[in-house]
Amino acid sequence: MDAFSDLIRGVRAHGSLFGASTLSPPWALHFVDGAPLTLCTVLSGAGWIVPEHRPPEPLRARETIVVRGPATFTFVDEVGTRAEPIACGEHCATPEQGGTRHRRGWNDPGEDDCGGDAGDAGDAGDAGYAGNAGDAQDAGDGRGATTLIVGAYPVRGEISRRLLDALPVVLRVEGGGTADAVLDHLAAEVSVDTPGQQVVLDRLLDWMLVCTLREWFDRPGGEPPAWWAAQRDPVVGDALRLLHAEPAAPWTVAALADHTGVSRSTLAKRFADLVGEPPLTYLTRWRMTLAADLLVERQAATVADIARTVGYSDPFGFSAAFKRVRGINPSEFRRTATTLTGLRN
């Protein structure tokens, strides 16, 4: 297991709703749920992403933008559009609540387009949307139809929040990279209704997100997080994989050095230089991140059970380490996190 795989594993599309509505400019779709992470990509045509309190970002065919919440954003035909924003969120695709008709297909010829300038969207809590916007003949401006795909991702737990901390509010990846193949699969899959389509669409959105983040981290002149760059080092990368594969193992610097084939001093220096902290400090913080999620997910487990799971035989030593890293003891963290989870639900 590598660091990126660990951090992104809690960021998953699930139960995506796809639909189709044909819009003539002007249009303005306001995605109001403020999902922790939202991916927007255009198969054809163009528009603008306007994040809350941020400058507008053009979004052209085959380009992708990822917006980090909780800020909301709007997709418009042009900056300063005269269109009244249509709120797209949890109920946007629920006809009985005033939203657009939806299905798991692409276009549905012969049906009404659900209300003029309205767009189509799915559940922003853990969903993807697909909307078809901008009929060139109706618009009379020579532009082709704009087909937007939006995947909004919940972020479950402390592990995936470390990934969010490494991202800006808005990031952009141009077309022509590895994500283009995923776009082709998405376009083909949503064009027909077939058994198992929901699962396929969800996984394609996940694949799209992974490809997009990889390309953004590896972009020329970029400043990726330390753990991303360190994965490429033959020594430190091996050490990171070991720590993530077996976080509960009784690791020492000597043991890591032995597994990576270098001296203790070489490993310690290279790790600190590339990751920004010593190996065992990194391990402790990673164990406490794992423990934080386990405390919430396994309500029946005792603090001692969680301690053993993340590599501590002594629950008191674990509690001391948890408070040192998280600023709160494990029991208090569990109570607070459980209360907040209940309020969100």
Image: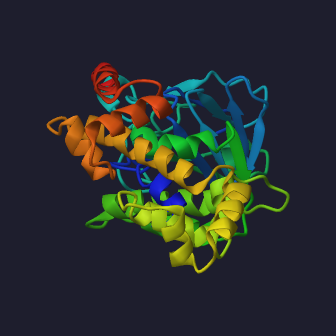
Looking at this view, name the residue that lies furthest to the right: 221
* Residue at 30 percent of width and 67 percent of height: 194
Position of 95 relative to 208 (above/below): above
* Residue at 63 percent of width and 21 percent of height: 84
In the image, 197 versus 119, the foreground residue is: 197
In the image, 216 versus 6, the foreground residue is: 6
Model colouring: rainbow
Position of 244 relative to 88 (above/below): below
**Residue 190 at what x, y percent from top left?**
43, 61
From where the camera sits, is residue 68 visible? yes
Q: Is residue 254 left or right of residue 112?
A: right
In the image, 326 versus 336, the foreground residue is: 326
**Residue 10 at what x, y percent from top left?**
41, 49
Q: Is residue 76 left or right of residue 34?
A: right
Where's the C terminus, which quadrant?
Answer: top left
From where the camera sits, is residue 63 visible? no
Q: Is residue 137 left or right of residue 283?
A: right
* Residue at 17 percent of width and 39 percent of height: 301
Q: Which corner quadrant of the image does residue 181 belong to?
A: bottom right
Looking at this view, name the residue that lies furthest to the bottom: 261
**Residue 170 at what x, y percent from top left?**
69, 40
* Residue at 53 percent of width and 76 percent of height: 258
